[in-house]
Image (tube, rainbow, N blue to C red):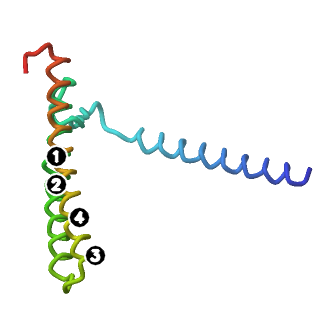
Amino acid sequence: MNRMIKIGRKVKVAGISVLAFLAGASVALAQTQGPQSISFSDPLGGHETFPSVATAVAGFLFWDIALPLCTIMVLVGAFQMMTSAGDPEKFSKGRKTILYAAIGFAIALIAGGVANLIKNVVSGGTG
């Protein structure tokens, strides 16, 4: 029973705090001088249709994520191969890193093609 009283007090304090915040916000908002226009920026960046959003997302994933990540992984694999010091296991690890980077890049290319395919299907083939 004592625990329920403590929880009830916490809920009461939280409720009073929320009401005080809302009352303070309404007073602060009430101090405006006449009508003001509010403008919002477009969160989609001018993309209003699904095909244009899909193209923008695919472009972002390819150019801003996949391409730099693939480049970095190829460099990491090359570094592993160069620093293997004749150890065949380390050299193989570097070669696998480069292979997996190439496979990942190919998957990113295919994903971009699939996004274009979906865009053409949704827009009725008007590209």
Query: What amino acid does circle 4 point to?
Result: Thr
Q: What residue did someone put label 1 on?
A: 106
Question: Which amino acid lies under the numbered mark 2 shown in the image of this protein?
Answer: Ala
Q: Label 1, secondary structure: give it.
A: helix
Which quarter of the picture shows residue 2? bottom right
Left or right placement of residue 30 versus residue 1 in this view: left
Label 2: state its secondary structure: helix
Q: Label 3, label 2: how many angstroms apart (C-alpha)?
A: 20 Å
Q: Is 55 on the left-hand or right-hand side of 33?
A: left
Quadrant position of residue 6: bottom right
* Picture coordinates of residue 95, whole percent (x, y): 19, 67
Q: Quick check: 121 above or below 101?
A: above
Q: Which residue is mark 3?
A: 89
Residue 18: % across, % down:
59, 45
Q: Crowding near pointer 4: few (<14 within 10 Å), some, many (20+)? A: many
Whole-percent x, y for residue 102 in the image: 16, 54
Q: Label 4's element? A: helix
Name the N-terminal-most of marks 3 and 1.
3
Mark toward the start of the polypeptide (4 vs 3): 3
What label does residue 97 carry, if any?
4
The mark lying in front, picked from 4 and 3, is 3
Residues marked 4 and 3 touching at CB (< 8 Å) = no
Residue at the (19%, 71%) spot, across then down: 76
Residue at the spot of label 2: 102
* Label 1: few (<14), some (14–19) or many (≥20) C-alpha neighbours in 10 Å: few
Residue at left offset 17%, top offset 50% = 105
Callout 2–callout 1 Cβ contact below 8 Å: yes
Callout 3 amino acid:
Glu
